[in-house]
Amino acid sequence: MTTERETPEPSELAMQAARAVMSDDVEGVWERAVVIEKFFSDYERQAPGWVSVEERLPDDSRTVLIVFEGPNKQPDYLLAYCRDEEWYDLGDDPQGNVTHWQELSPLPQTPGAEEGRPPY
């Protein structure tokens, strides 16, 4: 008996990267890696700022900066994550009325710190 594993649907970005490396002009692992590196480097330079939640959502459980309708109907922002199309702040409290989100910048590099980790 064969069991099928559920595979998540790839993002549009992943599909674009796959099309880039599957081009007839690209042969070999090294050449494909170069194409992937250039693709993501170009994407990061052109990365959008605020993304509407109606346009797309971030990957599940990825921490991002969100804009939501706060008290008195005023826009407010905080760090949050989205899981199963529901938003939560970093204390795992539900957040409603989220309108936009934005990727976080990488952490700054400091002498003696591991890459991507704060020096404490």
Image (cartoon, rainbow, N blue to C red):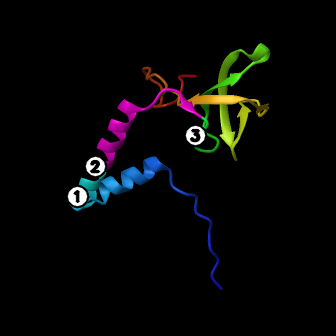
Labels 3 and 2: the sequence-earlier one: 2
The residue carrying pointer 1 sits among few (fewer than 14), some (14 to 19) or many (20 or more) residues within 10 Å by Cα, namely some
Question: How far separated are the C-alphas under marks 3 and 1?
Answer: 30 Å
16 left or right, relative to 119? left
Label 3 belongs to which residue? 58
Query: Toward the viewer: 95 or 35?
Result: 95
Residue flagged by tag 1: what amino acid is it?
Answer: Val
Residue reaching furthest to the bottom: 1
- Left or right of 109 on screen, residue 56: right
> Pointer 2: what residue?
35
Point 31% across, 53% down: residue? 20
- Is 57 rendered above or below residue 17? above
Q: CA distance from mark 3 to mark 2?
A: 24 Å
In front: 13, or 110? 13
Magenta segment range? Answer: 35-52
Whichever of labels 2 and 1 marks the residue nearer the N terminus, that label is: 1
Label 3 or label 1, whichever comes before in sequence order? 1
Q: Residue at x 27, y 48 (%)?
A: 34
The answer to if 59 sits in the magenta stretch is: no
Left or right: where does residue 21 sit relative to residue 68? left
Q: Secondary structure at mark 1?
A: loop
Q: Are marks 2 and 1 in contact (CB under 8 Å)?
A: yes
Which quarter of the figure has residue 23?
A: bottom left
Quadrant the C terminus occupies: top right
The x, y position of residue 30, in whole percent, is 25, 55
Q: Which type of secondary structure does the marked residue at label 2 adopt?
A: helix
- The quadrant the N terminus occupies is bottom right
Name above or below for residue 40 compared with residue 11. Answer: above
Q: Please give the residue where the numbered disc 1 appears in the rendered image.
A: 26
Give the amino acid at mark 3: Pro
